Structure formats: structure tokens, C-alpha cells
Image (tube, helix red, strand yellow):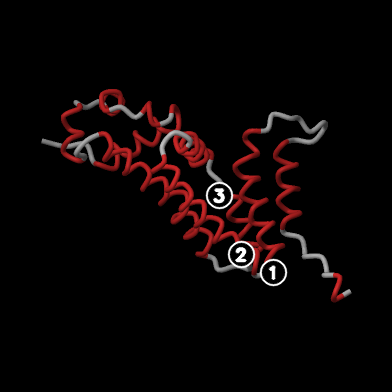
């Protein structure tokens, strides 16, 4: 008898999470989408909560660990790595990220996990910006702005006149990579 691999359950669960949040992650609809019976689910997971926990693990691996690995592979300068990080931004990951953020508003355990993951992300951004921003406050501000641009851009409905959203976002991101202004003490 062939069993549906655990990874397929997780992948289908991530799709459901991205589309409808944690309430959309239900065993029967997942089994139906996979074309299997729900009994196969229990070969891999004790219960629905075990799947939800695994989805959060998978999201962390995709959004943090895999992203950092991809960025670090080439070993370029920090600005090039920041550009690469911006270029690998994946809509699917963002959809999951937004679903987790909404979920965290109602679940303190998920909120604590989100904070830990966001702290990891900010730590990585800090390390990249600090490599060319000697002022720690400037590096911190740029890190926050870069992270906010990635998350917040999707909540803003405003237009940009003759400019495309993509062009404006790219320009905003490039401004974060600009050479830091000389401090008044060194001028």
C-alpha cells in the first residue's frame, strides 16, 4: 500500500493556510485535495494540532532558513545580498506569512513564535545593513524599513500616478542601500 508522503500533507496544508488561514487547515478537505482518505493523515500526524505545528515549522524553514541559505550561497557584498533577498521574495511565502500574522492576533503561542521568527529576520537584516552602515541606529532603521516594505507594501492600496508599484518599491528599496550620510561630527 502506498501512503501519501508527509511532505504532501504539509504542502497542501501550507496552501490551505495561505488561502484561508488556520481555520482552512482541515483534515477532510486536505485529504480530498490530495485525492486520498483522511485515514492516511494519521500515519503522519497525531492530530490536526500536530499538522498546524508542522506548518509553522515548514513556514520558518522556507521563509528564514532557506532564504538565508540562498542569499548567502554567493557570498557577495552586503548590498548584493540585500538585493538578492529582495529578489527572492516569494508571493506564496508572503501569503503564508500574512496568514500567520493574522493567526498570531488570536493565538498567543503563534504570536510568540512569530516574534521569534521576526527577531531572526531582523537579526539577519541588521547584520547585512551593519556591514555598510557604521551607525547602529541607522542600520536598525534601515532593517525595519526593509522589513516593513516587504510586509506592509501589500496592505497599501494607494496608486503612484504614472509610476508602477514595482518601480516605486524598487526605488524605495534602493534608497535603503544608499551610502550612509556622513555624521555631523565627521563633517
Circle 3 Cα neighbour tier, 10 Å, few/some/many (<14 / 14–19 / ≥20): few
Residue matched to label 2: 128
Residue matched to label 3? 88
The residue lying toward the viewer, choosing from 60 and 2, is 60
Q: Which mark is residue 132?
A: 1
Disc 3 to disc 2, C-alpha distance: 16 Å
Residue at the far front: name it: 108
In the rendered image, which quarter is residue 106 located in? Answer: top left
Label 1 and label 3: CA atoms lie apart by 22 Å
Image vertical order of residue 185 relative to residue 155, above or below: below
Q: Earlier in the sequence, mark 3 or mark 2?
A: 3
Q: Is 85 left or right of 53, judged from the image as shown?
A: right
| Residue drawn at point x = 49 percent, y = 34 percent | 102
Mark 1 secondary-structure assignment: loop
The alpha-carbon separation of the residues under discs 2 and 1 comes to 8 Å
Q: Of the residues tagged 3 and 2, which is closer to the observer?
A: 2
Amino acid at each position: 500500500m502506498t501512503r501519501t508522503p508527509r511532505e504532501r500533507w504539509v504542502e497542501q496544508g501550507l496552501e490551505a493556510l495561505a488561502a484561508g488561514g488556520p481555520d482552512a487547515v482541515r483534515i477532510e478537505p486536505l485529504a480530498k485535495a490530495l485525492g486520498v482518505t483522511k485515514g492516511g493523515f494519521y500515519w503522519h500526524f497525531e492530530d490536526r494540532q500536530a499538522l498546524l505545528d508542522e506548518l509553522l515549522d515548514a513556514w520558518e524553514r522556507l521563509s528564514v532558513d532557506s532564504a538565508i541559505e540562498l542569499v548567502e550561497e554567493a557570498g557577495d557584498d552586503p548590498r548584493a545580498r540585500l538585493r538578492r533577498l529582495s529578489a527572492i521574495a516569494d508571493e506564496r511565502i508572503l501569503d503564508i506569512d500574512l496568514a500567520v500574522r493574522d493567526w498570531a492576533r488570536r493565538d498567543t503561542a503563534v504570536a510568540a513564535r512569530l516574534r521569534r521568527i521576526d527577531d531572526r529576520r531582523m537579526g539577519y537584516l541588521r547584520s547585512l545593513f551593519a556591514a555598510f552602515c557604521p551607525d547602529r541606529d541607522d542600520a536598525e532603521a534601515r532593517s525595519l524599513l526593509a522589513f516593513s516594505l516587504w510586509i506592509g507594501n501589500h496592505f497599501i492600496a494607494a496608486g503612484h500616478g504614472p509610476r508602477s508599484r514595482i518601480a516605486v518599491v524598487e526605488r524605495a528599496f534602493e534608497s535603503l542601500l544608499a551610502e550612509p550620510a556622513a555624521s555631523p561630527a565627521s563633517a
